Image (cartoon, rainbow, N blue to C red):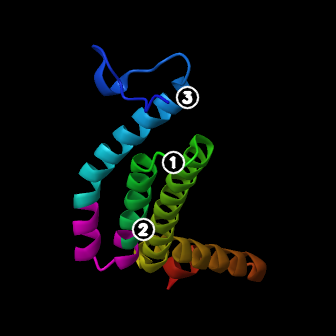
C-alpha cells in the first residue's frame, strides 16, 4: 500500500483524493510539531525560571505525544485525530486555568482595589446612620 509519501511539486503538503483526510492530518501534525517545538523552548525556559514545574512537564508531555502521533504510522487515523484534539484541548485548558487562577490570586492580593470599595461602604453606612439620627454631619462640623 502507498505509504502516502508525497511526490511531485507540492512536496510534503501533497493531498491525494483517495486519502485526503489522512494526508491532511499528516500535514497538520507536522506543522503542529514544528511550530510546537519552536514555542516549546521559551515556554519551558520561562516556566522553569518562574518555578512552574507543572507547565514544563505539561509542555513536554504534550509535545512528546504529538511527536509520537506524527511518527507512528500504524496508529489508526481516527485515534491519531482524536489524540491530537485531546492533547490540544488539555494543553489549552491547563494554560487558561492557570492564568485564571493567577489573575484571581493577584486580584485578591491587591489591596488597592479593595480600599475604594471599603471606603465607599463606610461612607454610605455613615450617611445612613446620620440620616437615621436626623443629624447632618456637615452642618454640625461647620458650627463647631
Q: 94 above or below 12?
A: below
Q: CA distance from mark 3 to mark 2?
A: 28 Å
Residue 92 as seen in the image, left or right of residue 35: right
Q: Can you name the residue that lies furthest to the front here?
A: 1
* Residue labelled with disc 1: 74
48 in the magenta segment: yes
Percent x, y of residue 108: 49, 77
Q: Which residue is mark 2?
A: 58
Q: What residue range appears in magenta?
A: 42-56
10 Å neighbourhood of mark 2: few (<14), some, or many (≥20)?
Answer: some
Precedes in sequence: disc 2 or disc 1: 2
- Return the disc, 1 or 3, that comes first in the chain's sequence: 3
- Residues at badges 3 and 2 in contact (C-beta under 8 Å)? no
Depth-wise, is mark 3 or mark 2 nearer the camera? 3
Question: Going 51% across and 48% down the picture, which residue do you hit?
Answer: 74
Residue 44 left/right relative to 102: left
The image position of residue 50, as x and y in percent, is 27, 75
Residue 102, image quadrant: bottom left
Q: CA distance from mark 1 to mark 3?
A: 16 Å
Q: Residue at (61%, 75%) from the top-left corner?
A: 121
In the image shown, does 118 or 52 lie closer to the viewer? Answer: 52
Whether residue 135 can be seen here: no
Instruction: Write the residue at 57% across / 54% down.
Output: 86
Q: Residues within 10 Å of mark 1 (few under 14, many from 20)?
A: few
Viewer-proximal residue, 123 or 15? 15
Q: Which residue is mark 3?
A: 21
Q: Is residue 85 above or below residue 28?
A: below
Left or right: 135, with 110 as reference point:
right
Amino acid at each position: 500500500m502507498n505509504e502516502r509519501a508525497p511526490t511531485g511539486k507540492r512536496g510534503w503538503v501533497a493531498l491525494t483524493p483517495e486519502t485526503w483526510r489522512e494526508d491532511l492530518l499528516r500535514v497538520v501534525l507536522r506543522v503542529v510539531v514544528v511550530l510546537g517545538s519552536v514555542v516549546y523552548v521559551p515556554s519551558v525556559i520561562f516556566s522553569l525560571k518562574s518555578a512552574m514545574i507543572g507547565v514544563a512537564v505539561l509542555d513536554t508531555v504534550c509535545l512528546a505525544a504529538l511527536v509520537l502521533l506524527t511518527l507512528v504510522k500504524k496508529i489508526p487515523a481516527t485515534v491519531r485525530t482524536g489524540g491530537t484534539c485531546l492533547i490540544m484541548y488539555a494543553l489549552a485548558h491547563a494554560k487558561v486555568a492557570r492564568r485564571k487562577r493567577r489573575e484571581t490570586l493577584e486580584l485578591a492580593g491587591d489591596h488597592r482595589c479593595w480600599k475604594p470599595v471599603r471606603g465607599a461602604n463606610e461612607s454610605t453606612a455613615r450617611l445612613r446612620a446620620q440620616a437615621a439620627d436626623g443629624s447632618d454631619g456637615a452642618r454640625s462640623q461647620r458650627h463647631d
